[in-house]
Image (cartoon, rainbow, N blue to C red):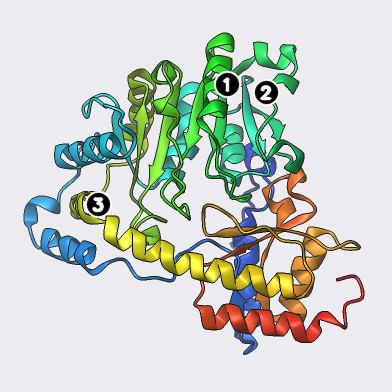
Amino acid sequence: MIKQPITFEPTERLRKLPPYLFAEIDRKKRELIAKGKDVIDLGVGDPDIPTPDFIVKALQEAATHPRNHRYALDQGMPEFRQAIRAWFQHRFNVKLDPDKEVLPLIGSKEGIGHLPLAVLDPGRVCLVPDPGYPVYRSGTLFAGGIPYTMPLLEKNGYLPDLKMIPADVLKNTKLMFLNYPNNPTSTVATKAFFQEAVEFAHKYQILIAHDAAYSEMTYEGLKSPSILEIPGAKEIAVELFSLSKTYNMTGWRIGFAVGNAQVLALLGKVKSNLDSGIFQAIQIAGTKALQEGQKALEQNLKIYQERRDLLVQGFRDLGWKIEAPKATFYVWIPVPAGYTSSELALKFLEELNIVVTPGNGFGPNGEGYFRISLTMAESRIMEALDRIKKSHSHYSKI
């Protein structure tokens, strides 16, 4: 006798989540490609530039050794942790204990998602920037925490106004996410802001988790600071870094967290129960990237800056008011009057076959903007601009 199929409903925590922004965009993009459309994807920030050869060769060599085929150490290879320590001291002049203040991650996204499980009890508040990377909110919800929105407004330079957070919220707050250089707005924070944030965190006994995935992606000589450069920061902060954007290694899944030793030990305990470390050959390649990757990074930045200038000037020629970002490979653009960010993104996708990311996908305060990624060749950016230019007169609202 055949029984009725069993239906498995999503849990309450899954029902609380909005659709993951990039998955929805990818689904619509694939539908158009299946119909034979020439889609230009300026949506997800996934570098089109290959991983540098010397990193790939390091992986190939390491992968031939059987000792790297076994379970990796939960805390990461000592050689990789030492490379992180050396890179961090050279870059920020901050000393780290490689055994206690460094924790390799399977990409910074993994660390961001797991951190609330380590430090946030159910019912406690996490301060989440808005617009912001969606995983700050989803990781909080998975842990049973309560996300509280910190608006990032243009009038405030896309920095949160910490003084506007109500006292009753702060009494229940345990964690705060920050992200500079910022995705999606491309803002770079100053040491003065980090000083304010560190003092704020000490006053209210809040852990700061600073997502520094784009720390090395800055232009015209600008250097993005580390929050750990601020005196007292190690007592209340961890910082998460990624090799993905810096060295074109998004698919490799490798990053690291540094900072407060007690918090990293808690995060490590979560990870030891949920994963088995990073493939050692990838850690060896990551070590090579940190030790020898500066020249490749500079070449990447030159390419992205040229693409940025091309895109910004193209929009300006069409009468759009647009600022050239000083960091990341994103351009944050105001939506013309008469459209929501989703309406404009849908119009670009369906009528021009161009993928852009609507600002409201990063939170309610992202409404009124859309994000373009510079991870496409100049020829494709020029083609996208040409499509927009040809259609421009047909859209009375643009």
For mark 3, what is the residue?
286
Residue 360 shown left or right of residue 40 in the figure: right
* Residue toward you, 201 or 323: 323
Tally of numbered tags: 3
Q: Residue furthest front?
A: 221
Task: Look at mark 2 in the image and give the residue it sits on.
Answer: 162
- The quarter of the rendered structure image containing the C terminus is bottom right
Q: Nearer the viewer, mark 3 or mark 1?
A: 1
At x 78%, y 59%, the residue is 341
Element assignment for label 1: helix
Rendered location of residue 72, percent (x, y): 20, 43
Is any atom of residue 28 visible in this view?
Answer: no
Which tag, 1 or 2, sits closer to the chain's start? 2
Image quarter for residue 63? Answer: bottom left
Proximity of marks 1 and 2: CB atoms separated by less than 8 Å: yes
Residue ID for mark 1 = 196
Q: Earlier in the sequence, mark 3 or mark 1?
A: 1
Does 348 sit above or below residue 198? below
Indicate the amino acid at tag 1. Answer: Glu
Residue 264, x across and y down, in percent: 35, 26
Q: Helix, strand or loop at disc 3?
A: helix
Measured in 3D between alpha carbons, the distance from the residue under mark 3 to the one under mark 1, in whole angstroms, is 33 Å
**Image coordinates for residue 219, horizontal then vertical, percent:** 48, 55
Q: Is 382 displayed left or right of 168 in the figure? A: left
Q: In the rendered image, is residue 219 in sight?
A: yes
Residue 238's disc number: none
Q: Residue at x 39, y 42 (%)?
A: 241
Q: CA distance from mark 3 to mark 2?
A: 36 Å
Seen from the viewer's position, the closer of residues 330 and 189 is 189
Q: CA distance from mark 1 to mark 2?
A: 9 Å
